[in-house]
Each structure stands twice: as C-alpha cells, then as structure tokens.
Amino acid sequence: MMSGQVTSGWALGARALLALAATAVAVWLPAAASAQSESVRGLFDVGMSAYEDGNYEAAVEAFTEILATGVDDPIVHYNLANSWFKTGRLGYAVYHYRRAHALAPRDEDVAANLEYARFLALDRLEAEGAKTDLKVEGWIDRITPEEAYRVSTLLWVLAGTVGIFWQLARGNGLQWRRFFVVVLGVWAVSFAGAWTVEQRTTASEEAVVLPPEAEVKNGPGVSFDTAFVLHEGAEVVVEGERGSWTEISLPGDLRGWISSDSIARL
C-alpha cells in the first residue's frame, strides 16, 4: 500500500552496518579493509544522524561520499534517496530508489518508497504498455544476476563432486552416473536462467531525468525545436548518444534528444 511518508532508513539499520562492512571487505585489500570499513560506517552514522535531525543536505553529502568510495550498496542508495526526497529533489530520489531496487529487488521498503516517488512524478508512466523498468515486472526480476549465477556456480561444483564419486564408484557406478546427469541438467537450466536474468537487466539502458524541467529536442542540439518537456523523476529509455546529447524514448512512440547533463543513467 502506498504511504504518504518515506520510510525511515533506521528500519534497515542493523542490516546496513553488516552489509556495508561486508562490501568494504570484499572490495578493498585485506590490509586496508578494516580502516576503510570503519570510515564507511562512520560516514553512514553521520548520514543517519543528519537525516534524523532533519539536516537532509548533510545526509545527502554523507551518503554520496560513501558511494564515491566505491561502495555500491542498496541501503546506501536507499537512504540517499530518502534524503534527496526530503530536500524536494524528486529526480535524484527516483534514481537512487531505482539503484537500490536493482540491487535489492525483494526489499519491501525500497519498493514502497519507489512507488510513492513515482506517484509524485509529473511524467509518471502508466502501468499498461510501460516500456521502462522491465526489471521488476515479474518474479524472475526479483532475482539479481549475481544471485542467479551464485546458484549456478554451486550446482556446477556439486555436479563436479558427483562426477568424481561416479568415477571412483565401483558397484554403484550406474546410480552415481544418473545422479550426475540429473545435477548437470539442473545446472544447465540454472545457468540458462541466470543468463536470462542478466540479459533482461541489460536489455535496454534506462535513465532518470534530474532537473525540475528538461526540454526534449527534435535533434541533438539547442537549435532544434522543442518536441516536449519532461520533469524530474521521469524515467526514459536511452536509444543513442551524439556529443553532449542523448536520444531517449518513452511509451507512446515519444522520442527526442535531451542534454546528457539532464539525466542519470541506471
């Protein structure tokens, strides 16, 4: 159900610290991981304190600084989106809600806040025939490519283990062979599914309009006539690029060129 108030980031607080620590350990060298993790946790605490105090600009600064370190975490994007929303910058809020949703597609708080932000967008897409955000249309889109490939990798390891037992088996060789074939078949299906998930998420490049208003031209330049105007939070499909202009499309055969500075690509 849609809510008139953005869900507070403290609801994810404990998870946030664990996820941020894990991300830092995975990205940086072990020797620097501890110090970097402490720095990230410190910035996160600063951002959350600023948010709770109503200093949303400071919260934006803290969460943005975390992302600048290389952390690409759904909780950071989520809280940054909340902070942008509170400052009235709907375009930035939608963008970071979308980033959080792509990284954590089953998170209900992220989905609810994204839905509410979209509801407020002046150029919101109608559900029927919408061309953008195909990533979250069905159950398959509630799985990230990383999760799908992780399952496929585990099944591959299992198939290899079963294959070894098959080769070492004596009297039960036929049973191990059948087990191996079954596991290998399941792995093939899982790998195809992981590939499908990855292709679905990269099938089309999308973007979000950031400024309050952005003119869409009939061609890649200011000298072309204005085809229509989009507002912050509008979600578009990227079709091409020429110089400092990006060709975009929307449902209903709407198409035109927008300044690349006016959009953030997902």
Image (cartoon, rainbow, N blue to C red):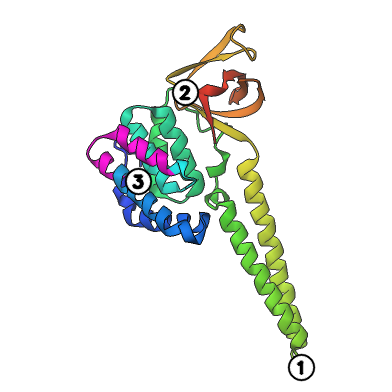
Q: Amino acid at mark 2?
A: Asp
Assign the N terminus to one quadrant of the image.
top left
Mark 1 closeness class: few <14, some 14–19, many ≥20 residues within 10 Å: few
Residue positioned 56% across, 48% down in the render: 141
Precedes in sequence: disc 2 or disc 1: 2
Q: How many other residues sit within 10 Å of disc 2, few (<14), some (14-19) or many (≥20)?
A: some
Query: Which sits in the foreground, 86 or 132?
Result: 86
Distance from disc 2 to disc 3, alpha carbons, whole Å, reads: 34 Å
Residue 51 is inside the magenta segment: yes
Q: Mark 2 and mark 1: span between their CA atoms?
A: 69 Å
Which one is nearer the viewer's eye here, 128 or 86? 86
Q: Earlier in the sequence, mark 3 or mark 1?
A: 3
The residue at which mark 2 appears reads as: 123
In the displayed structure image, the side of residue 228 where residue 219 appears, left or right: right
Q: Nearer the viewer, mark 2 or mark 3?
A: 3
Does the CB distance between marks 3 and 1 fall below 8 Å? Answer: no
Where residue 243 appears, as percent x and y from the top left, is 65, 20
